Image: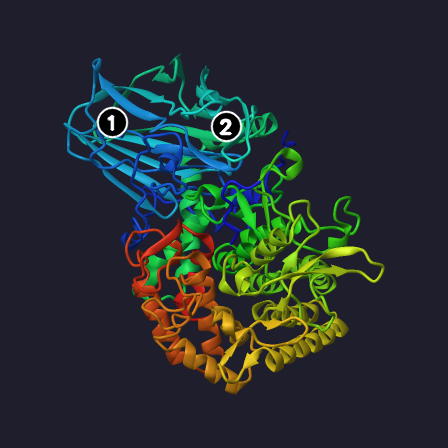
């Protein structure tokens, strides 16, 4: 995962195919069901699997820090999200924290609580805290608050997402007393303005006939705030209202009071929509009318969909681990972003909580996330794979035809032509796409998806051997593209390290000898660059993907292709097995380009376990690797599977890829142990990982990585690939 820190007019959006399926009860949904008496409730065990309480104090999340301390909730790929107020924060009662909105690529808080309901009786405002602090909780698919107003009145607020651009809020007032009650309703909220120009002047309030809107000025601050001046946040009420605006504060009043007979209730319903373009806004207003015409049905369908999601992720999971599975589910769904800008299919971002991961979709994150997502939403898993392959370089590319078949490292709302600084084509990412496609197919049974993806996967394989096999010996290297930013040997080495996904791992240190070589076609055309070492994980992944291509070809009736890919996989595995294992060290290592010498002086890295996951290692090699993986002085640390062995002179438990535990590498190591018959070891290490990694068993977020010596959380919270690969780890089917 490349962590970028200050490095160098959207067209009409058709109705998202995923949104259409959801609204129609299609591939991502479960059949809609109607409950005779209120909304069906999920098991209490799944309440507050994540602590979503908190209220922002500044517009920029984290008050200038990169991580947002408030964990939020989103659904359906929306680009805005909400949290719950703290129990003692009376100023936030009656509303949901936020929303947090994504200014194309960066998260910002619009308000402390933009839509706070107030109830009045005989001209007197009712005290929402009359009966004490509200009960405020998150449940799968919705946020809920319950207020005791005293004297027989109760107020319940529920927030769900109705579409990929709109949240539905229902405020139900119930009269449990003996006498009729006549109530008025109003809403108020204020903007949280960014502190600095030009962002400070971006949002502005405007009254509408059905509520209130926020318009955004055009701001093109590459590393902080990106809007086109067409974005809009809009609150639409079902009932007639009138709104007044005073600077950064608005007040909305219901046009008529409501009289509740004893035992009766009334629901005030409204929507909150965030759109990027005028065309989106026009489309969304039509959808909002449909939502407000049947809010109870929309809420019921959402609950049914989430029951299907929960069933998918908890199937086969031991009872004591199911809350962790649901936490993974909520993490992935909140990080789901629908098609917008230059992202043409729904995808999953690494984390809405970390500034630099909020608005982008990375390649190898996507491959791993799709495997987990397929357990509850195969259609979404397919979509995120398509989102990356939409940007596969074509042979007729006007800027990089030599890279035909390549998948870029990361795509964002803005490509470079639109001033985006985060989009990256300086490198690709490890080739796990065929594995992801096959795993998704295993859950969906959709052969059409295999037929669609097969030629694209073949082109990606071909690119690796054309552009990253310097000496044409069938073993590839990580490298860099011919890109203006790769303008020096050091920048090329950096991009090559990014391509591995293990950015600053010791094996890519310039100080330990890593250099760069140029790769050229037969006619002298520069194709790109390679590091001067052939990497064990890369070639094991290539062998695995060749095996999956054989399966895909067989499943779609291409027998000759299947035999070809099986032969390729066998040959690649043999080359890794014969050249990259050091018997004296009992470990797999990268080898020097040209000499083939194992680079043992750079220490043992967790990438040496990948040949077990891919089935590349011999039985004897696997036995030796197993001994290292189960040794407390090597990889069986307090939280097992550090990225660098504890015995290595380069081990650092908190230094990104130089020691912390990443769940993808744990997944590969555990799967490798199981594959070679060491299931008991794998289970013991799985239990240790799940028990000792901070927050997994409580209500803390799933992290990007963890300190292997203490289990302390490190780096980005609410991290998608950790959540995705936890799901198979919980069932032991890595």
Q: Is residue 293 in sight in this rendering?
A: no
Q: Is residue 481 in sight in this rendering?
A: yes
The picture quadrant where one finds residue 292 is top left
Q: Is residue 185 left or right of residue 577?
A: left
Q: Secondary structure at mark 1?
A: helix
Residue shown at 37% from the left, 59% from the top: 706
Residue shown at 49% from the left, 81% from the top: 585
**Residue nearest the observer in this picture, 387 or 630:** 630
User: Measured along the vertical axis of the image, is residue 300 above or below residue 669?
Assistant: above
Residue shown at 48% from the left, 69% from the top: 605
User: Measured along the vertical axis of the image, is residue 150 above or below residue 360?
Assistant: above
**Residue nearest the observer in this picture, 340 or 583:** 583
The picture quadrant where one finds residue 654 is bottom left
Residue 92 position in % (x across, y down): 27, 29
**Residue assigned mark 2:** 289
Residue shown at 48% from the left, 51% from the top: 30
Q: Is residue 103 left or right of residue 264?
A: right
Q: Secondary structure at mark 2?
A: helix
User: Measured along the vertical axis of the image, is residue 729 above or below residue 357?
Assistant: below
Query: Dot 1: few (<14), some (14–19), or many (≥20) neighbours within 10 Å?
Result: few
Query: Dot 2: few (<14), some (14–19), or many (≥20) neighbours within 10 Å?
Result: some
Q: What is the CA distance from the residue labelled 1 to the residue labelled 2?
A: 31 Å
**Residue assigned mark 1:** 91
Q: Is residue 14 left or right of residue 185?
A: right
Residue 198 position in % (x across, y down): 49, 23
Instruction: Report the disc number at residue 227.
Output: none
Residue 312 position in % (x across, y down): 44, 59
Frontmost of labels 1 and 2 is: 1
The picture quadrant where one finds residue 73 is top left
């Amino acid at each position: 995962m490349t962590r970028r820190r200050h490095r160098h007019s959207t067209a009409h959006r058709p109705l998202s195919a995923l949104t259409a399926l959801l609204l129609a009860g299609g591939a991502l949904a479960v059949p809609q069901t109607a409950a005779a008496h209120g909304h069906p409730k999920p098991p209490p065990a799944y309440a507050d699997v994540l602590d979503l309480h908190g209220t922002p104090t500044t517009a920029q999340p984290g008050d200038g820090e990169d991580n947002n301390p408030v964990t939020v909730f989103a659904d359906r790929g929306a680009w805005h999200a909400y949290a719950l107020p703290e129990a003692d924060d009376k100023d936030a009662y009656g509303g949901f924290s936020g929303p947090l909105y994504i200014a194309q690529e960066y998260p910002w808080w619009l308000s402390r609580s933009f839509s706070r309901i107030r109830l009045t009786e005989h001209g007197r405002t009712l005290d929402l805290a009359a009966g004490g602090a509200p009960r405020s909780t998150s449940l799968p698919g919705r946020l809920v608050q319950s207020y005791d107003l005293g004297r027989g009145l109760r107020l319940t607020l529920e927030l769900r997402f109705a579409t990929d651009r709109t949240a539905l809020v229902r405020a139900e007032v119930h009269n449990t007393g003996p006498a009729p009650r006549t109530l008025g309703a109003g809403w108020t909220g204020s903007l949280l303005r960014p502190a600095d120009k030009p962002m400070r002047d971006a949002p502005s309030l405007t009254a509408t006939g059905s509520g209130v809107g926020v318009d955004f000025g055009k701001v093109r601050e590459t590393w902080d705030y990106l809007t086109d001046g067409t974005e809009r946040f809009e609150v639409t009420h079902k009932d007639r209202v009138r709104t007044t605006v005073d600077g950064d504060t608005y007040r909305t009043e219901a046009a008529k009071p409501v009289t509740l007979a004893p035992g009766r209730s009334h629901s005030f319903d409204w929507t909150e929509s965030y759109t990027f373009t005028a065309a989106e806004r026009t489309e969304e207003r039509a959808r909002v009318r449909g939502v407000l015409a049947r809010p109870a049905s929309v809420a019921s369908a959402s609950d049914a969909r989430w029951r299907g999601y929960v069933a998918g992720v908890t199937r086969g999971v031991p009872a004591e681990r199911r809350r962790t599975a649901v936490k993974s589910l909520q993490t992935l769904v909140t990080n789901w972003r629908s098609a917008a800008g230059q992202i043409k299919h729904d995808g999953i971002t690494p984390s809405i909580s970390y500034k630099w991961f909020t608005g982008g979709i990375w390649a190898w994150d996507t491959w791993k996330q799709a495997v987990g997502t397929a357990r509850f939403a195969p259609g979404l898993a397919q979509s995120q794979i398509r989102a990356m392959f939409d940007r596969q370089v074509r042979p007729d590319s006007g800027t990089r035809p030599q890279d035909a078949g390549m998948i870029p490292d990361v795509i964002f709302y803005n490509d470079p032509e639109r001033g985006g600084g985060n989009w990256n084509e300086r490198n690709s990412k490890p080739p796990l796409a065929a594995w992801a496609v096959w795993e998704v197919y295993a859950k969906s049974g959709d052969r059409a998806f295999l037929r669609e993806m097969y030629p694209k996967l073949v082109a990606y394989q071909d690119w690796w051997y054309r552009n990253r096999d310097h000496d044409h010996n069938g073993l590839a290297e990580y490298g860099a593209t011919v890109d203006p930013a790769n303008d020096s040997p050091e920048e090329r080495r950096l991009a090559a390290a990014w391509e591995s996904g293990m950015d600053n791992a010791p094996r890519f240190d310039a100080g330990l000898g890593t250099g760069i070589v140029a790769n050229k076609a037969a006619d002298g055309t520069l194709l790109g660059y390679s590091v001067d070492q052939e990497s064990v994980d890369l070639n094991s992944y290539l062998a695995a993907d060749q095996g999956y291509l054989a399966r895909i070809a067989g499943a779609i009736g291409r027998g000759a292709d299947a035999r070809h890919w099986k032969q390729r996989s066998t040959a690649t595995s043999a080359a890794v097995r014969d050249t990259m294992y050091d018997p004296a060290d009992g470990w797999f290592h990268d080898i020097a380009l040209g000499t083939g010498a194992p680079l043992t002086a750079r220490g043992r890295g967790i990438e040496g376990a990948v040949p077990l996951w891919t089935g590349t290692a011999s039985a004897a090699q696997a036995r030796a690797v197993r001994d290292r993986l189960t040794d407390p002085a090597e990889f069986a640390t307090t939280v097992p599977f550090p990225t660098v062995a504890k015995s290595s002179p380069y081990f650092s438990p908190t230094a990104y890829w130089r020691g912390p535990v990443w769940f993808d590498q744990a997944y590969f190591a555990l799967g490798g142990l199981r594959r070679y018959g060491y299931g008991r070891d794998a289970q013991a290490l799985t239990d240790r990982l799940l028990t000792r990694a901070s927050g997994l068993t409580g209500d803390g977020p799933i992290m990007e990585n963890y300190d292997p010596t203490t289990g302390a959380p490190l780096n980005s919270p609410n991290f998608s690939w950790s959540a995705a690969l936890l799901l198979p780890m919980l069932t032991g089917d890595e």
